[in-house]
Image (cartoon, rainbow, N blue to C red):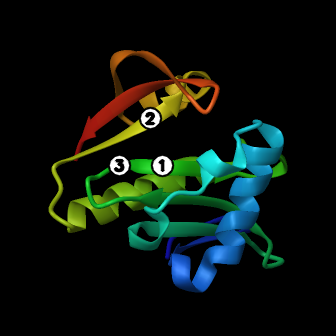
Amino acid sequence: MPTLPEITIRAASWSHDRAAIEHVRRRVFIDEQGVPEHEEWDTLDPQCAHVLAIAAKRDVVGTARLDDTGKIGRVAVMPEWRGRGIGARMVEILMERAQQKGLGRVHLNAQVAAIDFYRRLGFEPVGEVFDDAGIAHRRMERAL
């Protein structure tokens, strides 16, 4: 898998890597952003393709997922690891996976504060801002 300095990003699965995925998402979404726990966990995780970002000392520092419709979601990087390109690389890997599955487009629901991040990756906003788990979001799409 591609690497960044100090970071390895690898394919993951809910069945084998659930604890690591949950650790990152709990810290970022539930603890930091205040997403209610019952809204963070859904029935899609077992069917999704996941990635994990792992630091040189084997600490899991990021995760993201792709569902069968081409929706990228749950992109999370631990606060102390942000700004190093980890989130962008995870999204790029999931876009490559979507393309390998024959999908022509991907989409996501971006937190409004992250719209510029996704624009740099080629995503364009679609529709109006909406609330998801108490956080303003906007749908974004990108052709592959």
Question: Can the viewer see residue 120?
Answer: no
Q: Which residue is mark 2?
A: 109
Query: Where residue 73 appears, x then y in whole percent?
Result: 48, 49
* Amino acid type at image mark 1: Gly
Label 3 secondary element: loop
Residue at 26% over, 53% down: 69
Q: Are marks 1 and 2 in contact (CB under 8 Å)?
A: yes
Q: CA distance from mark 3 to mark 1?
A: 6 Å
Question: Can the viewer see residue 134?
Answer: yes
Query: Where residue 66 appears, x then y in whole percent?
Result: 40, 58
Instruction: Name the one closer to the observer, 130 or 28.
Output: 130
* Amino acid type at image mark 2: Asn
Q: CA distance from mark 1 to mark 2?
A: 7 Å
Residue 12 tag number:
none
Q: CA distance from mark 2 to mark 3?
A: 8 Å
Q: Which residue is mark 1?
A: 73
Instruction: Name the one closer to the observer, 62 or 109.
Output: 109
Residue 71 tag number:
3
Indicate left or right for 44 with 16 as reference.
Answer: left
Q: Within 10 angstroms of label 3, few (less than 14), some, or many (20 or more) residues? A: many
* Amino acid type at image mark 3: Lys
Residue at the extreme bottom of the image, as rendered: 16
Residue at 52% over, 57% down: 42
Query: Where residue 53 appears, x then y in whole percent?
Result: 64, 66
Indicate left or right for 91 with 139 as reference.
Answer: right
Q: Are marks 3 and 1 in contact (CB under 8 Å)?
A: yes
- Which sits earlier in the primary sequence, circle 2 or circle 3? 3
Instruction: Name the one closer to the observer, 126 or 14.
Output: 14
Residue at 40% over, 39% down: 108
The quadrant in which residue 3 appears is: bottom right
Q: Are marks 2 and 3 in contact (CB under 8 Å)?
A: yes
Label 2 secondary element: strand
